[in-house]
Image (cartoon, grey):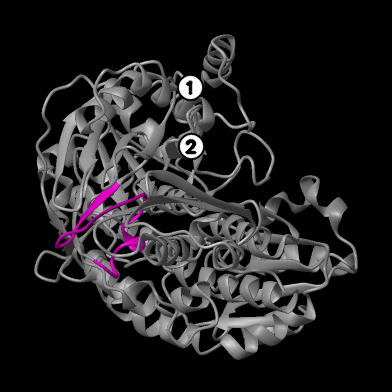
Amino acid sequence: MCGIIGYVGKAEAVPILLEGLKRLEYRGYDSAGVATLEEGLVSVRKEVGRIDDLRRSIALNPIGGSTGISHTRWATHGKVTRENAHPHLDRSGKLALVHNGVIENYAELRTQLEEEGHLFVSQTDTEALAQLVGRAFDRSTERNQGALVSAVREALTHVKGTYGIAVVHAELPGLIIGARRGSPLVLGIGKGEHFLASDVSAIVGHTRDVVYLNDYEIAAITGEGFVLSTIDGAGAGYNVTTVDMSHEDVDKGEYPHYMLKEIHEQVRSVTDALRGRLSHEEATAKLGGLNMSNGDLRSIERIVLSGCGTAFHAAMVGEYLIESLAQIPTECEYASEFRYRNLPMTKDTLVFVLSQSGETADTLAALRESQRKGHRTLGICNNVASTIARESDGGVYMHAGPEIGVAATKSFTSQVTVLTLIALLLGRIRNLSSSAGSRIISELEELPAKIDRVLKLEVEIAAIARRYAQSKVMLFMGRQYNYPVALEGALKLKEISYIAAMGYPSAELKHGVIALVNPETPSVVIAPNDAVFAKNLSNIEEVKARGGPVIAIGTEGKGNELSLICDDVILIPEASEILTPILASIVLQFFAYYIAVELGCDVDKPRNLAKSVTVE
């Protein structure tokens, strides 16, 4: 898992590789390395720690060459050591390989290779793959591009698991071989140079023309061109895509962290999620990408929403939205559990999978399992060229723009916005009146301006956050639409500050959670002016009666009632209860961010986390 970038052309490879790795830092990693081809040798440099550590190592012991591969590692097999960092070499020392994914049968392969006399220097699953490719190439009577492609093809027939790989060999300068199954790879097309990367953000500074590899495809790449084939030896067609992303899109600009930049981008991202999708005339949403007629949608009797992490919390909000506006039974399933459950689903069940990257391994597996069972499965994702976008039966593109920060922010509010549009569309097809639809549209059109007002609360929220930054445990509570927001607020705090935080429905307080309440454990209660406001007040009173500090998120007009009993109150604009999750979540994003900054945490690269979880 994590980042790959390769370069082949006429320029010095190392500066390009290091720049690309820097662009991939947001994905999370613990070590990094590069391998280049020069003067008939493979030169490798690897370091534990940050890209800057690798850069300093290369400055002290330089390497050159115009062909190279590089990698940032997030440990799966083996500790965080220089030996376990990528690239890995084969027995000859002439072949280098980097790998994202997991080789599930690596122990069996390693035992077999060791019996043949291969020596291993790492604990990783990846080294077994490097040795396999090297063995196959050394058995070949030819030493050319076709022989290396064949060696990769042969090695991959022995592998169980997922991979995105890049391979170079000292005897074949000017050549990189890439292959994928379950882990993304994109080929960048330049003039007299080509790139291979796990994420397009690594190469947009050099090219915006790319080819996204499909599963079981192999790419042979030189400075002048490339050839695609399949693992079974057949030719493979391709489409060249122009990436809708610029070099500036993946820069922090004036902000100290990507996370803060992306919190502030939510006026634009929500506006873009709504653009062109609201019909005043019909009082409904227009979502042509679903590839379903109104008749098809009306025949749906059940909906399943599936995702992981933040996407799952957005799905939970979607469950409330769809059941409220469209009265269709809806449930949420963790994508990581979906493929292993024998979930009873009738033929009239519609499945949505949610993933910001469109490459989340568990969510992609849920998509494929749903389709295998014959259910129409739609995607909600932010990458129009992602695997989920390509393999789903239709869906809705979020238009959130690149999200670099590991802690998801604008992707959550964009997903909830899209789910609101889906709920509106389904509601209008069924039972929702035209006047009710028009009211929702008016609320949605006012939403960006209300988000902007929440962003103006930043200084106030930051001051409150600093007061609670030394807490060891925090509780987050909400009801109805805002219960998932409590879960998301707790997740944000855990992810970037490492404070133990837990989210609950407010009413569950007295069913066990109240045992955690004490003067050192703050409770964050989402209590907007909605149908359960009085109930939330009662829950707050229960916490205060036991000496627990309370930070309340309320709505303008209800501040006095909250201020009388809470230690701190943050007021969001008055809004329909179906939209308060979007506004309240932004408050919690700021809250988590400023606590993490106060504690000196690495906000954009939190420990042990990766942006896109592309392994199971």
Question: Which mark is on residue 615?
Answer: 2
Name the kind of residue labelled 2 in the image.
Val
Residue 348 visible (yes or no): no
Residue type marked 1: Arg
Q: Which mark is residue 341?
A: 1
Sequence-first disc among 1 and 2? 1
In the rendering, at what x and y percent does residue 380 appear?
Answer: 31, 50
Q: Is residue 60 above or below residue 49?
A: below
CA separation in Å, label 1 and label 2: 19 Å
Residue 1 versus residue 590 in the image, above or below: above
Dot 2: few (<14), some (14–19), or many (≥20) neighbours within 10 Å? some
Residue drawn at (70%, 87%) of the image: 463
Q: Residue at x 19, y 53 (%)?
A: 223
Question: In terms of secondary structure, where does tag 1 sit?
Answer: loop
Q: Is residue 237 on the magenta stretch?
A: no
Label 2: which secondary element = loop
Count of numbered circles on the image? 2
Can residue 146 be seen here? The reply is yes
Percent of width and height locating residue 505: 64, 53
In the displayed structure image, the side of residue 55 where residue 472 appears, left or right:
right
Residue placed most toward the observer, 580 or 228: 228
Residues at discs 1 and 2 in contact (Cβ within 8 Å) = no
Question: Of tags 1 and 2, which is closer to the observer?
Answer: 2
- Dot 1, crowdedness within 10 Å: few (<14), some or many (≥20)? few
What's drawn in magenta, residue-wise?
Answer: 186-206
Residue furthest to the front: 39
Query: Which residue lies at the image location 16% right of the left edge and 36% below the top edge?
Result: 228
Spot occupied by residue 601 in the image (x, y as percentages of width and height) = 69, 69
Quarter of image, res 230: top left
